Amino acid sequence: MVGLSGGVDSGIAASHLKQDGWNVTALFMKNWEEDDDEVYCAAREDLAMATQVSDALDIPLRTVNFSHEYWERVFAIFLREYRAGRTPNPDVLCNREIKFKEFLSYAQHLGSERIATGHYARIEESSGAFFLNKAQDLSKDQSYFLHALGQSALAPTLFPLGELKKTDVREEATALGLPNAQRKDSTGICFIGERRFNEFLARYLPVTPGRIQNLEGEVVGEHQGLWFYTLGQRQGLDIGGPGEPWYVAGKDMEHNVLTVIQGHDHPALMRQSVAVHEMHWINGAPKNWPLRCQAKTRYRQTDQPCTVQSNTPDRIEVVFDDLQRAPTPGQSLVLYDNERVLGGGVIDQT
């Protein structure tokens, strides 16, 4: 059973599975219906496209609604983290809780031997263990968002696009005559879609104005609620005056104060080390410490050499060789050994 979203990637994943001789069924998952309307009901458009793609590939299409599970296990945590002043990564939760838990359980209940998605990543098996590796196309690699998957999720999963380039995927879709061959890639919040983010967040978290001040305590503006801002952010501060642009450097939740600095690489934004909790190791925690590896503190970041120390399996300290700009509490830090994903966790403090 392949998760068919309506995008070109999942369509070509389904096509490859069929070509490889699998008996393929497609599944369209609807996971958000809180504010479906003519503007934001992306699911309606996606389902229509998924139906056209499944028809073109001559594979059956099922639909399922996981909106309740998504709200309880992804969106509620998303709001809780913002309310606490952190910046969560819903795509990681979405993969762990919905795509590779609910979807997997549903597929197995219907008798499917394997599940597949259009993610750009690779799974390798060795001596009965499953390893998660980066995709061949590093510009599209999505292993960062998949680091929280365990052995029970990786074992029955196929990533048919792991060895492909995105350009090849679009060329194949064009050659097959798929209606989504040139459809743009989806962005925005997982399953919710593209939004004016602050307006969307304001539906669930109240506008709570407070002071914006610099490191010397001088008031330089007013914010609309600390949950609307993240470390290193430049846009939306509305602070005038001379000098370099202003950036968010800190949030005081107790006093409702946003601290800002001037300059993209101001020392107040730079960190040599970060603490990480809720650590998940794909193939078990290392036996020997310290660990030399590479890390990402955000999706598009290049791999950063680092040394990892740990006192407990679920909490680590990562010391980088080079200073890092604005690693953000609530975001994911993912560890790599070159192309292999070791695991990851949530940035706790910097």
Image (cartoon, rainbow, N blue to C red):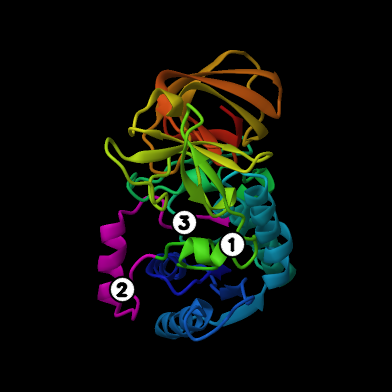
Q: Which residue is mark 2?
A: 181
Residue density around tag 1, few if under 14, some if 14–19, many if 20 or more, within 10 Å: many
The answer to whether residue 157 is visible is yes
Quadrant where the image shows the C terminus? top right
Residue 29 lies, in percent from the top left, at 59, 73
Q: Considering only vertical position in the picture, is 234 above or below 25?
A: above
Q: What segment carries the magenta color?
A: 157-185
Marks 3 and 2, Cα distance to the nearest angstrom? 16 Å
Closer to us: mark 1 or mark 2?
A: 2
Residue 179 lies, in percent from the top left, at 33, 81
Q: Considering only vertical position in the picture, is 38 above or below 334?
A: below
Q: Which residue is mark 1?
A: 115
Q: Considering only vertical position in the picture, is 299 above or below 22?
A: above
Circle number at residue 119: 3
Q: Residue at x 53, y 61 (%)?
A: 190
Residue 77 lies, in percent from the top left, at 69, 53
Amino acid type, residue under disc 1 in the picture? Ile
In the rendered picture of this protein, how many numbered marks are placed on residues?
3
Marks 1 and 2, Cα distance to the nearest angstrom? 23 Å
Which numbered disc flags the more N-terminal residue, 3 or 2? 3
Amino acid type, residue under disc 3 in the picture? His
Circle number at residue 140: none
